[in-house]
Amino acid sequence: MTNTSVTTPDVDVAAKPPSVEQLANRYTKIESRDVNVYYGEKHALKHVDLDVYQNEVTALIGPSGCGKSTFLRCLNRMNDVIDICRVTGRIALDEHDIYDPSLDVVQLRARVGMVFQKPNPFPKSIYDNISYGPRIHGLAHGKAELDEIVQKSLERAGLWKEVSDRLDQPGTGLSGGQQQRLCIARAIAVNPEVILMDEPCSALDPIATARIEELIDELRENFTIVIVTHSMQQAARVSQRTAFFHLGDLVEVGETEAIFTNPEDSRTQGYITGRFG
Amino acid sequence: MTDTTSSPQGESAGPARRPLTISPHLAKRYARERLFRTLGLASVATAGLILLVLVGSIVSKGYSAFWLHHVDLTIEFSVDELNPDGGPIEMETLQKANYLGLVRDALKREFPDAASDRRERRKLYGLVSPNADIMLRNMVLNDPSLVGTTQTVSFKMSDDMDTFAKGFIDRDLPESDRRVTDAEIKWHDHFEAEGRVHVAFNIDFFTKGDSREPEEAGIYGALIGSILTLTVTLLVSFPVGVMAAVYLEEFAPKNRFTDLIEVNINNLAAVPSIVFGLLGLAVFLNFFGLPRSAPLAGGLVLALMTLPTIIIASRSALKAVPPSIREAALGLGASPLQVVTHHVLPLAMPGILTGTIIGMAQALGETAPLLMIGMVAFIVDVPQGFTDPATVLPVQVYIWADSPERAFVEKTSAAIMVLLGFLVLMNAIAVLLRKRFERRW
Ligand SMILES: Nc1ncnc2c1ncn2[C@@H]1O[C@H](COP(=O)(O)OP(=O)(O)OP(=O)(O)O)[C@@H](O)[C@H]1O
Ligand SMILES: [Mg+2]
């Protein structure tokens, strides 16, 4: 935590809380029940039940090593690539179990995109970075359509103006903030339903962070977003719902406003007021 | 830094300042740094010097192999010999005619007094290359109208005469101590005085196979042999090596079994090459019955030897690709195979190519395993395919270095120069390929 000196629970909650109507029509995009994750012997995530609602931003907070990234990576089965990792329980996307053996992981990851903590553009041109996903999934027919997808994605990520004249230059040559927006553009280019973000702003300066937060708020219109963050303010600013993890347990989950103003669990209270974590 | 040598004029006011003068500690550090630099420079200089001496000695010994002395003789294409029956000239007669006689006649005409003694006559005939008749026959077959005319024809000198003409044999030595007799020197001087000895680029060295006669021996056969052999090696070891590395690095589960494989591959890289030769003999020749002395068998043996090098280099190149790239591609929904072929392999390719070129350079210089499968044979014909008997450059160097004739000394060095040139070319290609791959990212 760099700029937080939270002493009172009432961090200003800037994100628009869902209206009454929205609350009534909430649609559960991702439903997880009794999710356990083991890294070898280590029980990293314990009996997590967490729902993610459509077109909302769900923030995962908690002290380092509590299992936020682990949970996030369960949602698009990125944990599959870790040999020693074992996942039990049920995670459903639109009520289909994503750990069903008949499910195609590639299709799942096309529907659940991911943005990583450190910007990781491919060492290719900006254009190729964005067009890679649509290309492998066959989303575009012909160059013109692909061009359009590239432009749209960059526009939605707020990067088009900065890079429109140098699409053929390597994505790795952009600044850190631009790279992260490039990665977001790359993720939305495959038109996923859910976007997972693991501390997307941790490597960025406050201005770049502000831009990304703005972007997240806009993206919420069309996507469902799950974000891991270490910044209380960020969670408060961008999310509608917040989940607090501690030592592998999901301690508390609820409306962001409620979590920050009136946490039920003392551990949550302690964490958001900066007493530990 | 604890030992602050406070400067005498140090003002005590204000926060304690560190002195800007160089403390003993710092001086020691500088000295160490200087020492390290000097040692590094000395090492580089030593390596450079050794290289210079090596190349210098090879070039100074071998440069003379690139040209040969020729001597002009007046040849009578006598009708008696070439068309004894008269009438139209028949190719068959031309084929069979005694061209050696023509050459000998010319020499006898030149030095009538030498013709009486039999031993001296033999020496006289030995002035020019023993293959002079073949050259004459080709001339006449190409142009039958020569029959009946008298022409001045330029002949290669025999190896000893060429060596003498190049000045490598001291004429002041007593006759018994040198390879050329007084008579031969006399004849040489005679031609020289008439301006009939001249030097020409030894093009045959680059266009012909091996020969018992040094002046006829060329490197081309061995060069083609090396190219064919290395082609087999590359075609086998590169795909297999890269596939093995990719599988082990990207797909195989990390467990004790794969650890065991890894250890064994590393050990394989250290196995003496002659063992691979024996293996090749047992497996490729005796069991599979591949032709002996052929680039196919040689290439396979060298591929066995090169594989561990390529696998190890490829694995470390793959390991060096940041995991974040794999995660990015996986997160976009690329299949594991797509992750490898679209992202990881292109990024690892420069490293893989470096490893491959090191392996290929080793293979190019390898002799021992090839001895085991019969590639050390004396082969005159330039190989036409992968199953023809062939030899390779280092083996050719070995054969020539082992030959007693003085003229093979320069050939040996010249062959080494060709070998090194080949090596430089291979490295240059690798650098170019690497540049191309690097530019793509
Ligand atoms: N690949 C792995 N192998 C073994 N253990 C792991 C692995 N990844 C995570 N862990 C363990 O699982 C626990 C949860 O890790 P996780 O990365 O989910 O934490 P986090 O909440 O994201 O922490 P941070 O905020 O520091 O990113 C940690 O104790 C960690 O040591
Ligand atoms: Mg994390």
Image: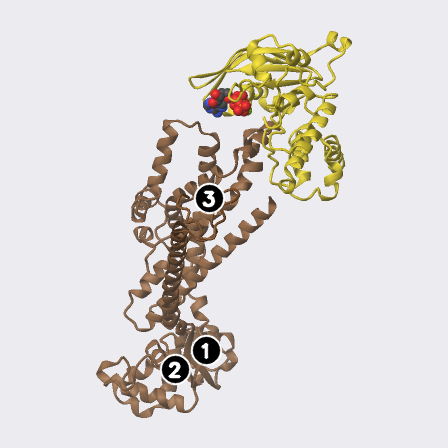
Answer few, some or many: residues within 10 Å of disc 2's Cα (few below 14, many 20 plus, some between 14 and 19).
many
Q: Secondary structure at mark 2?
A: helix
Q: Chain of mark 1?
A: B
Q: Tell me, yes or no, whether dots 1 and 3 are on the same chain.
A: yes
User: In the rendered structure, are the residues bearing label 2 and label 3 in contact, judged by CB atoms less than 8 Å apart?
Assistant: no
Q: Quadrant of the C terminus of chain B?
A: top right
Amino acid at pointer 3: Phe
| Disc 2 to disc 1, C-alpha distance | 20 Å
Q: Chain of mark 3?
A: B
In the foreground, B6 or B365: B6
Residue B200, numbered label: 1
Residue B103, numbered label: 2
Quadrant of residue A226 within the rendered picture: top right
Q: Residue at x 55, y 17 (%)?
A: A275
Tell me if residue A103 can be seen.
Answer: no
Q: Chain of mark 2?
A: B
Write down the residue under mark 3.
Answer: B238
> Which chain wears yellow?
A
Is B5 positioned to the left or the right of A232 in the image?
A: left
**Where's residue B326, x and y in %?**
55, 32
Give the number of the mark in front: 2 or 1.
Answer: 1
In the rendering, what colour is chain B? brown
Q: Earlier in the sequence, mark 1 or mark 3?
A: 1
